[in-house]
Amino acid sequence: MPQLPAVGRGQTIAQLRAGMNSLWLWLAGAVLASLLGTGLARRYALHRQLLDMPGDARRNHQLATPRGGGIAMALLMWLACLGLAMATGQWGWGLLAAGLAAVAGVGWWDDHRPLSIRLRFAVHLLSAGLLALAGIGFGWPLWLCMCGFIAALALTNIWNFIDGINGIAASQALLVTLLAAWLMTGAGQIFALLLLGVCAGFLPWNFPRARIFMGDVGSGALGYLLAALWAMAAATELRLGWLLALPLSACVLDATLTLLLRIRRGEKWWQPHSTHSYQIWARRLGRHTPVTLAYALWSLIAVLLALAFLRKMPLAFLPLACILWCTAGGMGWARLRKPVLNRNQT
């Protein structure tokens, strides 16, 4: 596997450039493969009439739109995990590939025929367990394997919840992977770059106009892979785990706070809905693009803050920085919902 050697260990400028060129080739290949693969997925979805119709409880669209475009991203990343397993000799990559196959497989099945919540959750539990076991193969400490399990279970579902307007799920994942690719080295950096590439290749099909949705196969796979990426970053250096949490905040806050609000109201929180703040805002504006761009701006600022904090902020202060950032995000979440709440009260 190509990687950037560390400066100051006898490497020549030519070697460093060769390493950089290899990384660019991996990224370009992932973008192109995802772009073409999503196009093929769209043809398949149209042929099989896999369409999301207007009025779906989770969607805010006006036209029948094919779904399942995320199969290309999931398949490419599955192949990437197998390739990394062979290149590095670490069996953790094989378990990660198995967990990804389970998450994407149940999502693909659900895109064709609705499945029970219990079955999907059981598969998500299994996949989260496989990520925890993969962590043992990677040499993670036990506490991080447990955190990886929780992150996989949470982000798999959060990315499914957040995939409700054009471009938001893919663009948020792209920004997280952009930061991870900058922070990490070696196989982890390759993994982040490939994930960044498949997101970038899918995005033109989904934003600003949605010609296909990623479907449960794509959203679940993305969330699962982001959980793995976060755990890899934290295993490299705990500081990196805190920094990567910053751009994850937009999706995590909206999904988590909305879930807690629905539980508090006594709603059937396990059923599909369209009451996340990003969905409320999109309906209010009558457009998806400004909302997706606003969420992207929030996450881009988080990326820039993470880079600023990388070496200048002591590790002990990073949790406080994350808490303050999430507090600001929570205030924004509440502000987006306030006009709707006021109308309901009149």
Image (cartoon, rainbow, N blue to C red):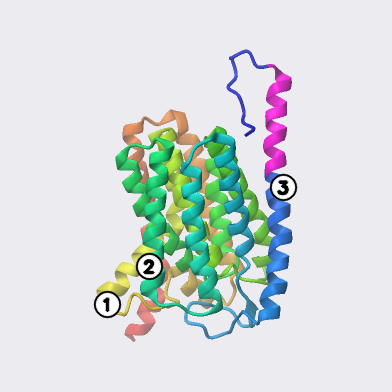
Horizontal and vertical percent for residue 108? 55, 69
**Is residue 43 left or right of 190 when viewed as pictured?**
right
Q: Secondary structure at mark 2?
A: helix
Horizontal and vertical percent for residue 56? 51, 83
Read off the residue under disc 3: 29
Magenta-colored span: 12-26
User: Which residue is drawn at the image coordinates 38% and 35% (left, top)?
Assistant: 238
Residue type highlighted by circle 3: Gly
Please name whichever residue, 90 or 318, is drawn nearer the observer in this view of the structure: 90
**Where is 158 relative to 133, above or below?**
below
Read off the residue under disc 2: 121
Tell me, yes or no, whether the two marked residues, 1 and 2, touch with CB atoms within 8 Å: no
Residue type highlighted by circle 1: Arg
User: Which residue is drawn at the image coordinates 52% and 77% (left, top)?
Assistant: 59
Please name whichever residue, 191 or 54, is drawn nearer the observer in this view of the structure: 191
Q: Earlier in the sequence, mark 1 or mark 2?
A: 2
| Residue 162 is inside the magenta segment | no
Please name whichever residue, 83 or 20, is drawn nearer the observer in this view of the structure: 83
Tell me, yes or no, whether the two marked residues, 3 and 1, touch with CB atoms within 8 Å: no
Q: Secondary structure at mark 3?
A: helix
Task: Give the Cα separation between the discs numbered 1 and 2.
Answer: 23 Å
